[in-house]
Every structure is written in structure tokens, then in C-alpha cells.
Amino acid sequence: MIIDGKQAAAELRKQLSVQVDQLQQEKNIIPGLTVILVGEDPASEVYVRNKVRQTRELGMNSNEIRLPADTGEAELLARLEQLNRDSEVHGILVQLPLPAHIDEARILAAIDPQKDVDGFHALNSGRLFNGSGDALVPCTPQGCVILAKRHLGNDLNGKHAVVIGRSNIVGKPVAILLLQENCTVTIAHSRTENLAGLCRQADILVAAVGRPHFVRGDWIKPGATVIDVGINRIADAGGKSRLVGDVDYQAAVEVAGAITPVPGGVGPMTIACLLKNTLAAARRYG
Ligand code: GUN
């Protein structure tokens, strides 16, 4: 079975759209998202365009700030300070990666945690870690859990989840969310011994390594739920490029109980969860 992320994202957006209308009618608040893009990374440009378009389609305000690649850290910090003070901006997203001369951690720490719709600020990761319920939670991990639950009848209790990848953006937060769903969670990474054997024990396998076709078909336990977070551009035989995940999809689809395709799996859910966080920020702090 294929887990349709496009469909799941469309359903989530439909629910959010009703809530956006309600917030406007009841409190006269229109959620507003500002996305900052520094430089001209083509993949980031596509993501940002999609984020801005979908925010507007939902009836929210969206603003894109594009800055040249040589923008200084001080300039970016000044922009953030301005946005932190702007009462019409409920969500601020700085698209990553940033150019090498900018200290990413410093930038993320400068975003008002109440407007941190990426959930990358230490206050939000701390709240997620503590399970205090009021965190703005990173979008891709939220999307992964929604898709896994969608396939498994909303119930992940007692499942063994193996997460490959330990980034702050995906691996670590998705592991915590799965733990909150009562999974038994193993976090694996590039130094893990016998990774294939470990993956074969997973009821839920989340691949977030950023390497095309890294997870082979014979690493997958028959019937497992496979969530593929990878978005890798590779050259195909005809000299064109195409997007593939971290999982060897053709092989995995024969073994898995369900799998997310790339594209059309986790990707659309990431953006839908960004819209969800923007609405949540506007509701809570607007
Ligand atoms: N670059 C790749 N993924 C993300 C994300 O989730 N948020 C931001 N801000 N940048 C990214």
C-alpha cells in the first residue's frame, strides 16, 4: 500500500482552512507567515515558492523576503528583530541552509519562540523534549507521524520504530514524537553497527539520511510501515534528473506493508504542517 501524502496534506489543509476562517470571524486575526530566503539555492527557491503559495491559498497572509547571498549576519538579525516586533507576523521561517558565513544557530536563536513555526528554537525543542504540549513542533517530523498513524489506524502503541538520522530538523524530533506515541524508539545513524539487521526489526522505519536509495529492500521487515523523508535529486539514464527518496522504493514496495512515495509522501505534509503551526501561533499568541 502507498501512503498518499498529497491526499493527507489536502485533507489537513481543508481542516485548517475552516479554522482560519473561524479565527478571522471570531477574533479578526489573519495568520501571517514571513519566509526569509538568503541566496539563490534552486531547491530552496522551489520550497519557499510553494510555502508562500499554499499559505495564501488557505486565506492567510504570506510575505517572502529575499536577500542576496552576501547578506551579513547583522543585517539578517536586524530583519528578524523587526519581524519579531511586527504584530501582523505570527510565523517566521528562515529557509535553511544559510550561506556558510552566517551562524545558523545564532539566527535560529534570534527568532521569537512564539513565532518559530519551524520549531527549531531551543525553547521549542526543550518543550518538545519535556512533552509540555505547548511546543511549536518541527514540520517534517509532525508530517511523518501523521502519515504513520494514518496507515496504522491512529495507534502506534508498542511499535518498534527505527529512525535513521539524528538531525535536529528530522531525526531527533521525530524520535521524540514517536516516543510520545508510545513507540519503542531506536535512533540509528551512519556509525550504527549492523544497520540492516536493526532496520529489519522495525515495525515503523523512518529514513532521514539524505542519501539516495540508502535503505535496501531486504532491510525492511515484511509488512512494516516505511516513511521516507529523503528528497534527493539524481541523474537518470536519459540524462535528466529526478527526485528519489532515501529508500529503494521499487524494492521496498514489494516488502513493506505501506510506504510513502517520493515525491508525494512526506514533502506535501511538511508544508501542510507549516500552515498548521502558523495557525497555531496566530491562535495562541495573535
Ligand atoms: N530546509 C530544509 N528543510 C527545512 C525546513 O523544514 N525548514 C527550513 N526553514 N529550512 C529547511
Image: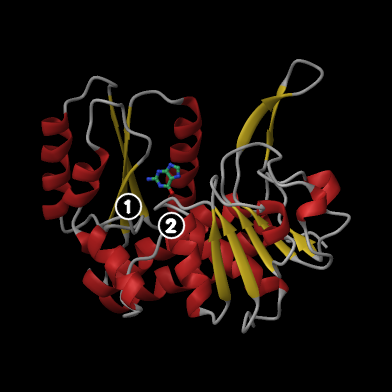
Would you name the residue on which mark 1 appears?
33
Label 2 CB, ligand 1: below 8 Å?
Answer: yes
Between residue 257 and residue 77, name the one nearer to us: 257
- The residue positioned 12% from the left and 45% from the top of the image is 82
Badges 2 and 1: C-beta atoms under 8 Å apart? Answer: yes
Would you name the residue on which mark 2 appears?
274
Q: Amino acid at mark 2?
A: Leu
Quarter of the image where the N terminus is located: bottom right
- The residue positioned 36% from the left and 40% from the top of the image is 95
Q: Position of residue 24 (x, y in %)?
A: 33, 70
Quadrant housing residue 160: bottom right
203 with respect to 267 (left or right): right
Between residue 55 and residue 212, name the one nearer to us: 212
- Per the image, label 2 sits on a secondary structure element best described as helix
Q: Amino acid at mark 1?
A: Leu
Q: Is residue 24 visible?
A: no
Q: Position of residue 48 (x, y in %)?
A: 43, 39
Q: Is residue 119 visible?
A: yes
- The residue positioned 67% from the left and 53% from the top of the image is 194
Between residue 240 and residue 45, name the one nearer to us: 240
